[in-house]
């Protein structure tokens, strides 16, 4: 087990190193932030002076080494768009909003996906099952931004029930959470359904029914408990996906989270903030995948040797 954990940790560190190189390179091919910071009548001397202040006059490999060194010491760099503010401070101020949205979206996915997966498995090849398949197909086919706009139009504009943008009370969270959680609810429903069908055909479930156990107890206690391994471990991947997928949803609903911060920084070619946000998202996704791998190894020892 210890060797398995060390191998997975090594893979995670290599993945983070690769991500940092990709982020650093992509951020610098999008354009020169000095074109945004300096006025149109700026002289070449102004460009040289600003580049020296921001360290943009150094070769790329030196900039990357400085970048890695700053990350190692917890310094994510000063923002170019918001002078005087550290990238870490900007992310920390926006992170609670993103975590709030991701948490409620995770709840939406679980509350909708798991019961619906159980119902469609129990009522296999019935109208309920077919409707569940349509729900899952649409959930994995509809883009988040399109679904968000439709929900805003129906519940915000036509009916006037819910606010369409900004952060406030729980009412401001409903539409973004539904938008972000719908696709994961559909995937979770399909995963739960397939796991339930596999368990329901097993011998011990047939034996439980022969003994005369209550059908509800057989389904919700014995079947779901044994079929829950795959859905439970999938929750870790969902959380990582919510962090990265929040960029689109936060942009649609003007939700002041890390995703919207990334969009604003990208429009201004703010290298420091863009790199920090993407590195955070990548770190969360890699960490959740690592936890899922370790959880699988704990639940099924055979995985440690594969």
Image: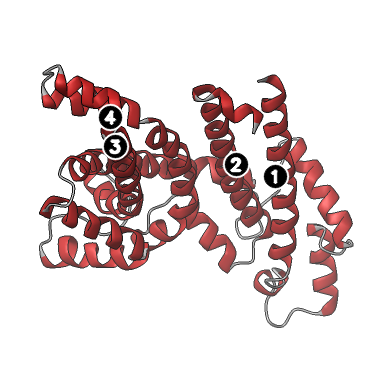
- Quick one: label 2 or label 4, which is nearer the N terminus? 4
Label 3: state its secondary structure: helix
- Give the CA separation, mark 2 to mark 4: 28 Å
Q: Is residue 255 above or below residue 76?
A: below
Residue 158's x, y, as percent?
12, 67
- Give the CA separation, mark 3 to mark 1: 36 Å
Tell me the crowding category of disc 1: few under 14, some 14 to 19, or many 20 or more residues within 10 angstroms, Cα based.
some
Tell me the crowding category of disc 2: few under 14, some 14 to 19, or many 20 or more residues within 10 angstroms, Cα based.
many
Label 4: state its secondary structure: helix
Return the residue found at the far bottom. Answer: 41
- What residue sits 30% from the left and 52% below the top? 182
Q: Which residue in the protein does label 2 denote? A: 286
Mark 2 vs mark 4: in front: 4
Q: Which residue in the protein does label 3 denote? A: 196
Residue 130's x, y, as percent?
18, 57
Residue 212 numbered mark, or none? none
Left or right, 257 with respect to 131, comes to: right
Where the N terminus falls, by quadrant?
top right
Pick whichever, 306 or 211, lies toward us: 211
* Corner quadrant of residue 31: bottom right
Q: Which residue in the protein does label 4 denote? A: 224
């Amino acid at each position: 087990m210890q060797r398995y954990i060390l191998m997975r940790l090594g893979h995670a560190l290599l993945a983070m190193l690769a991500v940092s190189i990709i982020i650093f390179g992509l951020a610098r091919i999008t354009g020169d932030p000095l074109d945004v910071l300096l006025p149109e009548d700026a002289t070449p001397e102004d460009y040289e002076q600003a580049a020296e202040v921001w360290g943009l006059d150094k070769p790329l490999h030196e900039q990357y080494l400085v970048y890695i060194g700053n990350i190692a010491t917890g310094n994510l760099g000063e923002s170019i768009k918001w002078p005087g503010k550290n990238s870490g401070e900007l992310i920390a101020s926006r992170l609670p909003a993103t975590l709030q949205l991701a948490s409620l979206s995770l709840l939406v996915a679980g509350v909708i996906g798991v019961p619906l997966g159980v119902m469609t498995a129990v009522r296999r090849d019935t109208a309920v099952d077919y409707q569940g398949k349509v729900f899952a197909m649409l959930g994995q086919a509809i883009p988040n931004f399109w679904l968000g706009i439709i929900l805003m139009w129906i519940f915000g504009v036509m009916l006037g029930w819910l606010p369409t943008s900004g952060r406030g009370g729980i009412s401001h969270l409903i539409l973004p959470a539904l938008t972000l959680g719908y696709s994961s609810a559909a995937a979770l429903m399909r995963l739960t359904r397939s796991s339930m069908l596999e368990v329901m055909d097993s011998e011990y479930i047939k034996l439980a029914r022969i003994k005369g156990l209550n059908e509800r107890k057989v389904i919700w206690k014995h079947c779901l408990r044994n079929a829950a391994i795959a859905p439970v471990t999938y929750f870790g991947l969902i959380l990582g996906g919510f962090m990265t997928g929040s960029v689109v949803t936060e942009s649609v609903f003007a939700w002041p989270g890390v995703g919207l911060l990334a969009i604003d920084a990208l429009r201004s070619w703010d290298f420091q903030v863009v790199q920090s946000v993407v590195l955070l998202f990548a770190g969360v996704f890699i960490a959740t995948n690592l936890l899922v791998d370790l959880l699988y190894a704990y639940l099924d020892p055979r995985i440690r040797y594969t």
